[in-house]
Amino acid sequence: MAIGDSVKGFNYAIKPVICIDATHLKARTMGVLLVGVCKDGNEMIYPLAFGFANSVCIESWTWLTE
């Protein structure tokens, strides 16, 4: 993913609604995948942030959204 292009695209055509979600990982790396996305002007999903955490808790969501 090209970070510079993502920043330019975010400033240009992103709708002001951000969705966050999590899914539990069940492989060798037990934990949680946290994701933050939104939609651009063409109704395409635009990734903003993702990260791995040990559990779904307030601290994990705070870390992702900072």
Image (cartoon, rainbow, N blue to C red):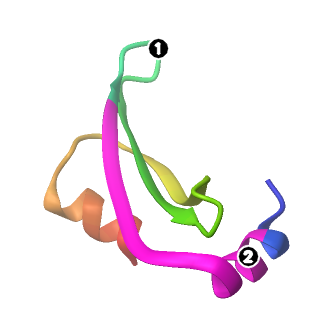
Mark 2 highlights which residue? 9
Q: Nearer the viewer, residue 37 or 30?
A: 37
Question: Is 13 left, or right, of 5 in this rendering?
Answer: left
Q: Position of residue 40 (x, y in %)?
A: 60, 66
* Residue 4 belongs to magenta span: no
Q: x and y percent of residue 19 in the render?
A: 35, 59
- SS of the residue at dot 2? helix
Q: Residue at x 47, y 14 (%)?
A: 28
Q: Position of residue 4 (x, y in %)?
A: 83, 75
What kind of residue is marked 1? Answer: Arg
In this picture, residue 21 sits left or right of residue 16: left
Coordinates of residue 16 in the picture (x, y in percent): 42, 80
Q: Residue at x 65, y 61 (%)?
A: 42
Vertical placement of 51 versus 17: above or below?
Answer: above
Q: Nearer the viewer, mark 2 or mark 1?
A: 2
10 vs 61, nearest the viewer: 10
Q: Image point 23% across, 41% down: which residue?
A: 55
Q: Secondary structure at mark 1?
A: loop
The answer to which quarter of the image holds residue 9 is bottom right
User: Does residue 35 appear to the left or right of 12 in the view shown?
Assistant: left
Q: Amino acid at mark 2?
A: Gly
Looking at this view, name the residue that lies furthest to the top: 27
Q: Pointer 1: what residue?
A: 28
> Which stretch did the figure color magenta?
6-23
Name, please, the residue furthest toward the bottom: 11
Mark 2, residues whose alpha carbon is within 10 Å: few (<14), some, or many (≥20)?
Answer: some
Numbered tag placed on residue 4 in the rendering: none
Upstream in sequence: badge 2 or badge 1: 2
